[in-house]
Structures are given as C-alpha cells and as structure tokens.
Amino acid sequence: MALAPTVQLRSGARLPVLGLGTWPLHDEEAAETVDLAIETGYRLIDTAENYRNEKGVGEGIRRSGLPREELFITTKFNREHHSTDGVRRAFEESTKLLGVDYIDLLLVHWPNPAQGRYVEAVQGIAALLEEGLVRAVGTSNFKPTHLQDVIDAGIVPDVNQIQLDPQRPRIEERAFHNEHGIVTESWSPLGPGSGLLDEPGVAAIAEAHGRTAAQVVLRWHVQQGLVAIPKSSNRERLAQNLDIFDFELSGAELANIYLLDTGAADIVDSDEFGH
Ligand code: A2P
C-alpha cells in the first residue's frame, strides 16, 4: 500500500499532498468512509465543524486502529468562533467530537469580512500552535486581500484551502501563496459536478496513460505543488484517487489541461458568503 508523499509546511509539519474530503457525509457514512480510506492508505482527513460529521470522522479513525500520530487531521470552525477565546472553544469542541487531543491543521473556514474578525481568528490558531495543540495554521476561502491583512498582523498561514480545479486554476491566488510560502490546498479538486471529468481533452490524456480522468486531474494538482482532497465514499474510487504517484504528465499535457480554464468564478464569493 503506497502512501501519498508529503510537503513541509512553514510550521515544520508535513502535510500529505493527497487526502480525503468528507463533505457532505453524515456521521455513520463518515465513520465507514474514513475507516476505509485509512485502510486504503489515506493519512490526511479533512473535516469541519460545519460538516457536522466530526464525531463520525473520529469514529472512523478509531475503527481503523491506526496510531493517531500517523494521521494528519484537519478541521475548520465557523464565524462565531472568530476571537482568541472562540478559537479555543472551537478547538475544544472539535477535539472532543473527534476524540483526539491535538489537531494537525486547524483552519478558519470562511473569512466573513463583514464581521471583520478573521485576523483575530488566525491569531487564535497561532496561540494554539504556540502551545503545541495544533501543528499548523490554516485559512480557507481567503482571498489575497484577506491574507494580506493576516500577514500585516505578523502571521503567515501555513495553508490556504480554496476551490481549485482545471476550469478555475486560480493562478493569481497561487502566485500570492507561493510568494509567501503558503501551501495551496484544493477543495472540490475534480470540479463541481461531473463536467470536467467528461472533457475530451482530459479523456485523451487519460487514455494515453491508461488512467482515469479523475487520476489525470488529481495528478495535475499534485504535480504542480497543490494539495488535493477529493471526496469519495466508493472503495474503487478512493483507491484510484490515491494511485497517482507512479506516472507523470508532460509539459504539453499540463498545458492542454490549462486550456480548460473557463475563467469561471468560484461557486461562491467569500466576500459575500460564509458561515
Ligand atoms: P463518490 O463519492 O460517489 O465517488 P468533492 O467535490 O466534494 O470532492 O466531491 C467529489 C465528487 O466526485 C463526489 O461526488 C464523488 O462521488 C466524485 N468522485 C470522487 N472520485 C471520483 C472518481 N475517481 N471518478 C469519478 N467521480 C469521483
């Protein structure tokens, strides 16, 4: 069983470059899927307060029997926790539900700029990092302007998790992240809906390598230094999504995949939407 390679974060923690997304699994599905994913070789598991499945994710981790320290567990909190004390409460609630005593990567789920407290939220995570309760500081759905505010306050997050796939490759955001040493993590890496996987351009590359369209798209992510967290609760698809570390896309193939960029916006605008 091959594990995904890891990338070193600014904090020193090592993040697997391919992991399991768990939205929208409810507790029992999450428990079964997480257990199966760990058996398949997944070590990075991504959940959130808002998914309401942290209890199930924790149950799956226990069922797997794998020692806690071999896993990289990430969760996120909602806007009512955007304060130093609030982040601590969020951490306590998540760790209780997950049944763990530390979180590898804790993320601010949405910036909620109208509330105006995302910098405090990141500072709250940084305080937990100092105490060794989290291993890395994360943001999610932050635009470069939001990240700049955080950086101006003296903290550079380790990871920013954003919606990213070949149809919306987020070039400017990635350039900003790279400039600051922030790792980009792609949510919905296979694209929303099935359209991307049906693209003839992807199918041609998949056929040339004897791979599936999903494997080609996930390879596109990791080969460019992105971390991808596809969700699947199907045994076969879980296995194929992790089986992408023994082939390589050529420069021409990567360029062809960039032709799929539709200029599409995110499905939601994080200046407007957030919880
Ligand atoms: P399934 O769980 O039935 O495999 P997200 O955007 O949240 O990551 O969701 C990914 C979607 O893509 C899910 O609906 C998942 O369905 C599907 N999916 C995951 N892996 C594959 C794959 N290898 N091939 C086709 N569809 C996939």
Image (spheres, grey):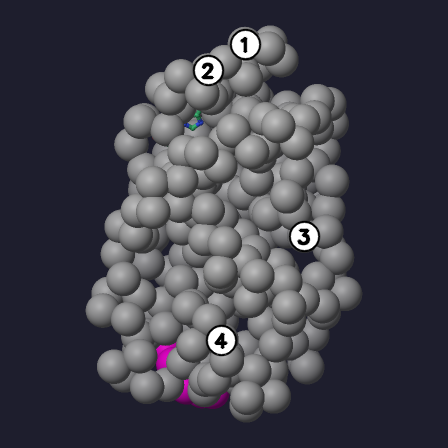
Identify the mark at residue 36; answer none if there is no mark. none
Distance (Cα) linking label 2 and label 4: 36 Å
The residue under label 1 is 207
Residue 137 locus on image (x, y percent): 59, 70
Label 3: few (<14), some or many (≥20) within 10 Å? Answer: many
Query: Is 86 situated above or below 186?
Result: below
The residue under label 2 is 203
Question: Between disc 2 and disc 3, whose residue precedes?
Answer: 3
Ligand 1 picture quarter: top left
**Type of amino acid under label 4:** Leu
The residue under label 4 is 147
**Type of amino acid under label 1:** Glu
Q: Residue at x 50, y 54 (%)?
A: 171
Label 2: few (<14), some or many (≥20) within 10 Å? Answer: some
**Type of amino acid under label 2:** Ala
- Is the C-beta separation of discs 1 and 2 under 8 Å? yes
Q: Residue at x 41, y 86 (%)?
A: 83
Residue 67 found in image quarter: top right
Residue 112 found in image quarter: bottom left
Which of the two residues, 185 or 80, is positioned nearer the viewer here? 185
Question: Between disc 3 and disc 4, whose residue precedes?
Answer: 3
Numbered disc in front, either 2 or 3 = 2
Q: Quick one: quadrant of the N terminus?
A: top right
Most common secondary structure along the magenta stretch: helix
Horizontal side of 269 relative to 156 (left or right) equals left
Circle 2: element type: helix
Numbered disc in front, either 3 or 1 = 1
The residue under label 3 is 15
Query: Is 194 situated above or below 92?
Result: above
Q: Is residue 85 magenta?
A: yes
Residue 207 locus on image (x, y percent): 54, 9
